[in-house]
Amino acid sequence: MKGHTLFNWIFALLASLVLLFIIAPLAGMFLHTSPEEMRSTASDPAVIRSVWYTLAIAFAATIIFAVGAVPLAWIMARRKFPLKNVVQGIIDLPVVLPHTAAGIALLGFISRDGFLGGAAQKAGILLVNNGAGIALAMAFVSLPFLINAARDGFAAVPERTEKAALMLGATQSRIFFTISLPQAWRSVVSGFIMMFARGMSEFGAVVIIAYHPMIAPVLIYDRFNTYGLSAARPASIIFILVALFFFVLFRVLATERRQIFRREDDATD
Amino acid sequence: MMLRTEKLCKRLDAFLLQEISLEVSKGDYYVLLGRSGAGKTQLLELICGLTPPDKGKIFLDGEDITRKRVQDRGIGLVFQDLALFPHFSVKDNIMYPLKVMKLPLKERVDRVQRTAGEMNITDLLLRKPENLSGGEKQRVALARTLVTQPKILLLDEPMASVDASLKDSIRRMLRRLNRNGQTIVHVTHDFGEAISLASRVGVMHNGRIIQEGTPDEVFTHPANRFVARYAGIKNFFRVTFVRSYNCCSCITDNRTKFKLPKGDYPSSGLLIIAATEVLLSRQGAAGVQINNIHGVIEDIVPSPLGYEITINAGDHFYADITRREMDEEKYVTGEPVIISFRPESLKMVGEGEEMNKY
């Protein structure tokens, strides 16, 4: 038992060090910022605008790309096809790429000379230095989080339930919407939150695509470059608090939904 | 003929379903019996279209359905794990196929109520599957399939998730369904289930149907040693026939000799003796002049009817004796005994080339 206690102490110590490493810089930032600085930054229209802009674009990018990402996740979970490992590698690629490199690659694609950029320009849309371009950059680096979480969710759905629905006469699309998606819902929502969170905190890829209009991470960088650390701190805190608020809110909403289901279950007993 | 398959073949990785031809008449209760891995479930999946066959044809009610969509075949399948939809209530599970059929709401509700009533699950309709027992889940899965009024009902090991105490009630329910005209194909590994339910039996082994017929035909005249073993027959011996002027006899590979009633016998075959027909005594069974073989009791184990005694007489014989007989004779292991058989209790099966495979 003595060895067991020592083991617990050592692990608790190591775990605390890691947690402290995460908390200390954030706590330091809060402690070094006066309420006065916070008040003035919170009422700065440029800061407010950039925060809302970041949230809105990250949310839109997640919703729009989910339309294709969720079916891709289902295919990865359910279908066997040649070079499936290569496709999985492609999906994971944005996670390992330096984000500035991802931005450069994307810029070539969406600039006026690029394939997508050229087509968009003909339709009268400019993707560079524009919200649409920022959304593409956010989606590019954060898509793997949604695809992989949803894929795991679909893979965990018992295939027999899908086969049973087929035997009961349902079409593939009905099975997807009534059997597969509801059972994988929790993972899909979790992937959605992760993609949103990752997208709104993106800096490297976005700054290559669009310095302006400024999203919050670019604004923080800009304040730091122009005015120094003390000017960047309050903007960082405000963005962290707002991001944290929405992150927690989505998590709570997802949990609420589960609990509502559970209450309905209890009520039927 | 309700269901007919014509030389169905399918290769699944290393496993091969070979030339499966079976016929199920309207109103039949057809039991496919075989060990796990025999290919029973794969055959069901071929019939209902979840897996396409490599070769062969499937006919349902005279129509070739080999390439027909799963949804349009009119076949109901209840999976071994039941595959209830966990996020739906029992009612919504049963309602699901009716919504797919786009039936009017009133008819949907009526059908759900009627089927739930027949399956005795009306009080479970608002529950979720996770709150049901194995037997209840089984009834719900059956109801969900029956509500579609399938031409033929396929059941994959329907007793697998049911407690032993509830098996009887499920069995009664299946018998009642069949009596009401539902054609059923039931897959199982359980010999008892086959005996108690089947109007016809097909025994599957290594991807083939090796014997087919009524339960009586199959289990009293097993075509080979695999079926015999399945039917619980333990005394079967490969024998060579010896013919002399006025009597017939046969001899096992271990030189045990049996005298047989007069008749025509092939040159070699399988000799089968029911364990209840093996007479055990210390001096030779009364009235039996021939086929008295000396041996030693090797093992005595309790059985549902009394005891099963293993006797080593060169070959191993198994004798079933009643508890009363045991109380009177008090046999012990290691004791020399005589086993006797009446010639008419010896059954011969011609051993074709197929025989040695099993």
Image (spheres, coloured by chain):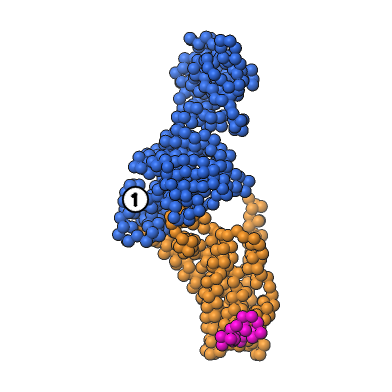
Chain colours: A orange, B blue
Crowd tier of the residue under label 1, counting other residues whose Cα lies within 10 Å: few below 14, some 14–19, many 20 or above: many
* Residue B149 x/y as whole percent: 37, 50
Residue A141 in the image: above or below residue A185: below
* Residue A33 x/y as whole percent: 59, 84
Depth check: give the residue in front, B215 or B280: B215
| Image: magenta residue range | A111-129
Helix, strand or loop status at disc 1: helix
Depth check: give the residue in front, A224 or B355: B355
What residue does disc 1 label?
B116
Q: Is A128 a magenta residue? A: yes
- Residue A269 image-quadrant placement: bottom left
Query: Label 1 sits on what residue type?
Result: Ala
Relative to A114, B246 lies left or right: left
What subunit carries mark 1?
B
* Residue A76 x/y as whole percent: 59, 62
Residue A251 in the image: above or below residue B235: below
Depth check: give the residue in front, A75 or B68: B68
Depth check: give the residue in front, B187 or A214: B187
Relative to A20, A157 lies left or right: left
Q: Is A113 a magenta residue? A: yes
